[in-house]
Amino acid sequence: MNPDQAKTVIGEDVEISGNVKCENDIKLNGKLNGDLTCGSQAMIGNTSAVKGNMTVETVSIMGQINGNITAKDKIELKSTARLHGDIRAKRLTVEDGVTFVGKVEVNPAGTSAGAPAQTKAQEEKSADDDSDATDAQGKGVFRR
């Protein structure tokens, strides 16, 4: 997204407490204490700070985010991005210098990944094995 083409621009001197929802491109340079839902492209500027979750089509992040991000298409983490939260998208780009703490799910096919199915032999072995399993520290280990 060209930053000059965003229909909605929130300046760096603006602080919003509450959720923001828009259908068109948005550029955020200020602070948001709430969730952002955008049906198009979002740009989170390097002066921005978001404390909340984001659901977007595409997002480019240069500022600070404390929350989870779900993008229908792409997440771009620019070199100045600071992200604490989980992200999920079809595509992801990460520049050198990014700080990211969280989990990532990138799935170009856009389908949910499920656990692999057990074979009939594995199911029977699990049913026949009645012994209690323990790990190295003596704690119980869950078995299916």
Image (cartoon, rainbow, N blue to C red):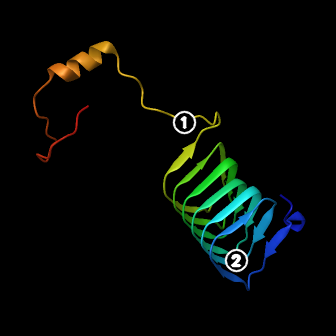
Q: Is residue 16 above or below residue 44?
A: below
Upstream in the sequence, badge 1 or badge 2?
Answer: 2
Q: What residue is drawn where x is 66% and y is 65%?
A: 36
Residue 95 in the image, given as x and y percentages of width and height: 66, 56
Q: Is residue 78 visible?
A: no
Crowdedness near tag 2: few (<14), some (14–19) or many (≥20) residues, C-alpha within 10 Å: some
> Tag 2's secondary structure?
loop
Q: CA distance from mark 1 to mark 2?
A: 34 Å
Crowdedness near tag 1: few (<14), some (14–19) or many (≥20) residues, C-alpha within 10 Å: few
Q: What residue is drawn where x is 11% and y is 45%?
A: 138
Q: Is residue 78 above or below residue 32?
A: above
Question: Label 2, on which residue?
Answer: 47
Q: Is residue 68 above or below residue 106?
A: below
Question: Label 1, on which residue?
Answer: 112
Residue 62 in the image, given as x and y percentages of width and height: 69, 67
Amino acid carrying label 2: it is Thr
Q: What residue is drawn where x is 31% and y is 14%?
A: 120
Most distant residue in the top direction = 121
* Left or right of residue 143: residue 8: right
Which image quarter holds the N terminus? bottom right
> Tag 1's secondary structure?
loop
Most distant residue in the bottom direction = 13
Residue 101 in the image, given as x and y percentages of width and height: 49, 60
Q: Which disc is residue 42 wearing?
A: none
Amino acid carrying label 1: it is Ser
Most distant residue in the right direction = 5
Which image quarter holds the C terminus? top left
